Amino acid sequence: TAVFLGPRSLEYTSLHGPLAFFPALPYLQDESMLPARKCAMVFPASVQKLIRALLVFGAALALPALASVEEIVGFKRYSDTFSSAGQPTAEQIPAIKAAGFERIIYLAFSDNPGALPDEDRLAFAQGLGFAHLAVDFANPTVADFRAFAGLMAARPEAPTLVHCQVNYRASAFSALYRIIHLGVPAEEAFAAMGTVWDPQDHPQWIDFIRAVLADAGRLDACGPCERAAQES
């Protein structure tokens, strides 16, 4: 197969065979009109190797850089199978699959600014599982967390990315799940959440954290609750 450099310019044969250049002809319009191969000028092997390298380099420059999960806003990795983040872009959905994740759990509203209304279809197109649990930032509830824990427990071994818009909801739910269901020390879990945000400025979230831990019989683990009480 011939590859065209442009109308009335030089043409060359497939990179899998010897590189042969033909003189430009005014009437040359398609591959079927290429002059016979015996008329071509075949370059020495060393020159062919150099041309191939230049063509490969040029093609690499032309390809867009692949997205990375680490570029998702607020991305936080807790283990090989559990991470949280803010809202990924449509271009970052394939990167989630490439990073080894098997499912996405979305904890915000699909009409939030920057949200992807068709994120479920984008995820399915990549072979990713997708679950949507809308959590009202102004009023998170124990029922929300129970529903989230049920989703996580359905496939506990599946590498999962939990996300919202900026990783506030997701990091809080992740911290609570790690404490209650994965046995991670509260100090470690809340410290990881603290690298994303501090819920002290949002009293409803302190109340939510306290309520979830109390529901699980782990109120002793509520470090943020104690700090909020001391600062009040």
Image (cartoon, rainbow, N blue to C red):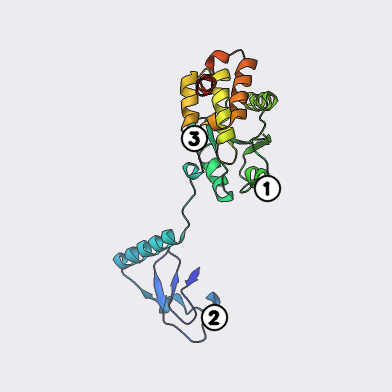
First along the sequence among labels 2 and 3: 2
Compute the Cα span from label 1 to label 2: 43 Å
**Is 71 in front, or is 200?**
200
In the picture of the structure, the residue carrying the numbered disc 3 is 196
Residue 20 visible? The answer is: yes
Q: Residues within 10 Å of mark 2 (few under 14, many from 20)?
A: few
Q: Residue at x 54, y 18 (%)?
A: 222
Q: Residue at x 40, y 72 (%)?
A: 20
Mark 1–mark 2 CB contact (< 8 Å): no
Specify the label residue 118 is tagged with. Answer: 1
In the picture of the structure, the residue carrying the numbered disc 2 is 29
Which residue, as the protein is rendered here, is positioned at the far front? 232
Compute the Cα span from label 1 to label 3: 26 Å
First along the sequence among labels 1 and 3: 1
Mark 1 belongs to which amino acid?
Asp
With 151 as the anchor, is 4 left or right in this view? left
